[in-house]
Image (cartoon, grey):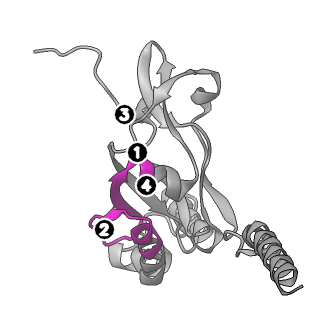
Amino acid sequence: MGTAFRRLSLIVGLSSALVVASVSPALADPPPPRAVVDGAPGWTAGAAVVGDVPAEQTQHLTVALNLRDEAGAEALAAAVSDPGDAGYRSFVSAADWRARFAPTDQTVQSVSAWLTSQGFSIGTVPANHRFIPITGTTAQVQAAFGTSVKNFDHDGRTTAAPASALTAPASVAGLIAGVSGLDESAVVRPDHLVG
């Protein structure tokens, strides 16, 4: 009876361990919610994929940040440009513009901290805080922004671009206006050289 009881205890113990192991992934913390920070280029919808961009390929990107008061900046630009407006040609200094509209130091720090946590190297952020230059690999870009970077046949050329929208955690997504540098079709290349 002692041996049968030990076998039954062992079977019950192993069964319980298997149940816990199979349920554990469901009990793990869900990933944080994500939001779109930039769409895939429209031309990719009709282009044929010709391959993956190598995971280890270096990517130099620019993460643009949202203005603090975009509506106010647009209103100021319209006022200083409209001869019928009392604010016509009443330009503001760069320092005043930064103080009123530029992304804050906290915004730059928050987005930079997330980008660094994803393995990117951060370049020099300009005084106006409008963008953060970053460098990383294709694999880091794909993991951080939840997309895949593919080579497409675009107008007879092999052109790299994201195959889907770029996303970021909701905690920083609202601070990001967009990401440039992944769509190679946006890079101007001369068809010929004169010289």
Would you name the residue on which mark 3 appears? Answer: 187
Label 4 and label 3: CA atoms lie apart by 21 Å
User: In front: mark 2 or mark 1?
Assistant: 1
- Give neighbour class at mark 1: few <14, some 14-19, many 20+ (Cα, 10 Å): some
The residue under label 2 is 126
Residue 129 showing in the rendered view: yes
Q: CA distance from mark 3 to mark 1?
A: 8 Å
Q: Earlier in the sequence, mark 3 or mark 1?
A: 1
Name the N-terminal-most of marks 2 and 4: 2
Q: Amino acid at mark 4?
A: Gln
Residue at the spot x=28%, y=64% of the render?
123
Q: Please tell me which of labels 3 and 2 falls first in the chain.
A: 2
Q: Amino acid at mark 2?
A: Pro
Residue type (three-letter) at the residue carrying disc 1: Gly
From this viewpoint, which residue is outermost toward the front? 1
Q: Nearer the viewer, mark 3 or mark 2?
A: 3
Numbered circle sitting on residue 4:
none
Q: Name the residue that disc number 1 marks.
A: 181
Q: Position of residue 137 (x, y in %)?
A: 36, 50
x, y percentage for residue 112? Answer: 41, 72
Numbered circle sitting on residue 140: 4
